[in-house]
Image: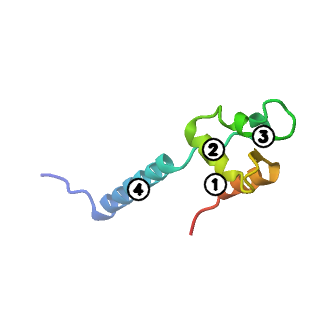
Amino acid sequence: MHAIPSLPLFLAAAIIAGVASTATAADKTAPPPLPDYDAIDKNKDGIVTLAEIDVYPPAIAARLHKCDTDKDKTLSREEYARCEHAAHTPSR
């Protein structure tokens, strides 16, 4: 005689599998975290320049370039903080 798994147990397993696959898909599409402002400021002058940004991988450098909202070719701490905060805020 074959045992038939109970329907509630089967449904619970299916739901857990679906949630796990959704979380994995979301993790794969999340952008990598931005490096710390002080880590980007290699010469420690308190100003992050495009030259300091451009040493990072293209995807990160492009995100940091977009943070330069006043287009002065430098990234202030305020611009970085706004950009970093936006990266962690879910879009609606």
Q: Does residue 88 show up?
A: no
Q: Is residue 91 above or below residue 68?
A: below
Reading the image, the residue beneath label 3 is: 48
Q: Earlier in the sequence, mark 4 or mark 3?
A: 4
Reading the image, the residue beneath label 1 is: 87
* Residue type indicated by callout 3: Val
The residue sitting at 78% across, 40% down in the picture is 48
Q: In screen coordinates, is 45 left or right of 55? A: right
* Residue type indicated by callout 4: Ile
* Local secondary structure at mark 4: helix
The Cα atoms of the two marked residues, 4 and 3, are separated by: 45 Å
The Cα atoms of the two marked residues, 2 and 1, are separated by: 8 Å
Reading the image, the residue beneath label 2 is: 33
The Cα atoms of the two marked residues, 1 and 4, are separated by: 28 Å
Q: Nearer the viewer, residue 54 or 73?
A: 73
Hey, which quadrant is residue 89 in on the image?
Answer: bottom right
Q: Earlier in the sequence, mark 3 or mark 1?
A: 3
State yes or no: discs 4 and 2 in contact (Cβ < 8 Å).
Answer: no
* Residue type indicated by callout 2: Pro
Residue 75's x, y, as percent? Answer: 76, 47
State yes or no: discs 2 and 1 in contact (Cβ < 8 Å).
Answer: yes
Q: Which mark is residue 16?
A: 4
State yes or no: discs 4 and 3 in contact (Cβ < 8 Å).
Answer: no
**What is the crowding at mark 2: few (fewer than 14 residues within 10 Å), some, or many (at least 20)?**
few
The Cα atoms of the two marked residues, 4 and 2, are separated by: 27 Å
The Cα atoms of the two marked residues, 3 and 1, are separated by: 19 Å
The residue sitting at 86% across, 40% down in the picture is 46
The Cα atoms of the two marked residues, 3 and 2, are separated by: 17 Å
Applied colour scheme: rainbow
Q: Earlier in the sequence, mark 2 or mark 1?
A: 2
